[in-house]
Amino acid sequence: MLSCDICGETVTSEPDMKAHLIVHMESEIICPFCKLSGVNYDEMCFHIETAHFEQNTLERNFERINTVQYGTSDNKKDNTLQCGMEVNSSILSGCASNHPKNSAQNLTKDSTLKHEGFYSENLTESRKFLKSREKQSSLTEIKGSVYETTYSPPECPFCGKIEEHSEDMETHVKTKHANLLDIPLEDCDQPLYDCPMCGLICTNYHILQEHVDLHLEENSFQQGMDRVQCSGDLQLAHQLQQEEDRKRRSEGSRQEIEEFQKLQRQYGLDNSGGYKQQQLRNMEIEVNRGRMPPSEFHRRKADMMESLALGFDDGKTKTSGIIEALHRYYQNAATDVRRVWLSSVVDHFHSSLGDKGWGCGYRNFQMLLSSLLQNDAYDDCLKGMSIPCIPKIQSMIEDAWKEGFDPQGASQLNNRLQGTKAWIGACEVYILLTSLRVKCHIVDFHKSTGPLGTHPRLFEWILNYYSSEGEGSPKVVCTSKPPIYLQHQGHSRTVIGIEEKKNRTLCLLIFDPGCPSREMQKLLKQDIEASSLKQLRKSMGNLKHKQYQILAVEGALSLEEKL
């Protein structure tokens, strides 16, 4: 047997109990005293206890009367209990439905039952409350405070209409406001609209439009935020790029300054002094190292000061007579040589302590000038002249600049050479010779013309220069041609002749200002060893610089030609 927790009715099976409970769920609970409805069972019990306390007191009095008056008779007691059960069942059924049964119809006409019927309604309600209090005591204790329920009819959330019962209100919403619900009314042919952005189903086009507008506003706001973020990112990127550019320019400027200073040091423009200062400094180093006695230092210093005052080279780095010695050698030896052409007589000058590392251009000019001074064809333009010292050569180039020669070159060297260790090249030698009325020209060999970076055309040009005289002459040809000034990156030398081997290969004969006098003097011996010529001979494989520049003298200039 199963007993209903709501009304106390017993049923025989679980399906019957489910059907019985559905009746309770579908029915509306109404207070038997004041007809309050719209609340659940627990709230109704609490309402009866608080709002109808006096009626519950009558039920307790009835229990005491029943105990005194009918306590001795078991039969009467059973009748009383049976009557009470019937009344209780009747009242509970009425509480679960809208039409409570009249309990007096179920009572007998016995006087005892009539007395009980007088209190039946209050008795039943009180028992119902006591039963609910036993089951819901914990809920009642949690609530704690006394609350009084005031019934208010349900109101439509869409149009504000008031209905008496919730079922009526539900029907009203489903029928009148079906288009506002997520699920439309059944058996309705109303069209559905899908949101293209999120897939939400709407039953009204205007609602869909408003919904999509919200999407668009959200996207517009997000895009605005993205633009703000993007603008901030672009500004940050621009600032970083500007900072990187500033660093790059600063680094580039620093590197340019360092490179420029390096070039200034390399080319003697760092204001570290000139020939005189370097000569004295290097002699002091020699004294400190014990390689030069102090007396020798003072003697050399005095000679240097005298040479600088006169403007003449002291001749201590000069080696003369090499061309004559080479002529004898080629006549008596050099069996592998078919023919050889030598320049006019020329002296060799090498670098000293005062110009070591930067004076090659000046020394090559001294070699070239030594040949011109021994050539009668240049007596008119070089009359009374001697080999100048390096500071004097610097002064002569500055004078040529003042005359208007090579203003671009003068600007590059700040119009100043004296007191510096500035390098000079073919252009400076050219303007110096031209200012002295010596006719010359420069030929550039700006790229390789042979395999492996060689310059065969350079060799051919020099061969044509020297062999233009004395066709059909003997093995050794001493020409009247001055030597050739040969310039390449970082160094310059002087070409004093050219060999033609029996296998038709060419070899230049070159004076190098970096070769000291003790090595050059080995060529002055009667029996010159072939190994001694190694420092002079330069084959095509020995000249592999990217570019070469030569200066060749062609004769003297008249005053008109000079102008």
Image (cartoon, helix red, strand yellow):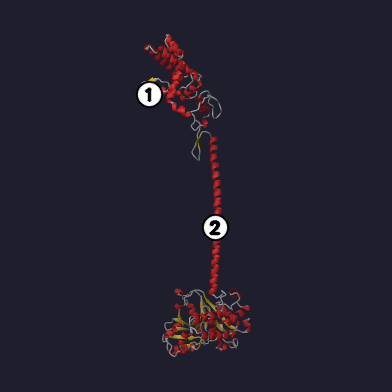
Task: Please state which amino acid type lies under the numbered disc 1.
Answer: Pro
Q: Residues within 10 Å of mark 2 (few under 14, many from 20)?
A: few
Secondary element at image label 2 = helix
Q: Position of residue 512 (x, y in %)?
A: 49, 81
In the rendered structure, find residue 241 and report the number of the disc placed on it. Answer: 2
- Above or below residue 405? Residue 152 is above
Q: Position of residue 417 (x, y in %)?
A: 58, 78
Residue 475 horizontal side relative to residue 206, left or right: left
- Above or below residue 452? Residue 319 is below
Q: Which residue is mark 1?
A: 15
- Above or below residue 208? Residue 534 is below
Looking at this view, is 260 or 274 the one in front?
A: 274
The answer to which quarter of the image holds residue 64 is top left
Give how far apart the Cα atoms at labels 2 and 1 are: 82 Å
Q: Position of residue 214 (x, y in %)?
A: 54, 39
Task: Please state which amino acid type lies under the numbered disc 2.
Answer: Gln
In the rendered structure, find residue 501 and report the number of the disc placed on it. Answer: none
- Above or below residue 498? Residue 123 is above
Q: Earlier in the sequence, mark 2 or mark 1?
A: 1
Looking at this view, is 341 or 345 the one in front?
A: 345
Residue 101 visible here = no
Q: Quadrant of the C terminus?
A: bottom right
Q: Quadrant of the N terminus?
A: top left
Secondary element at image label 1 = helix
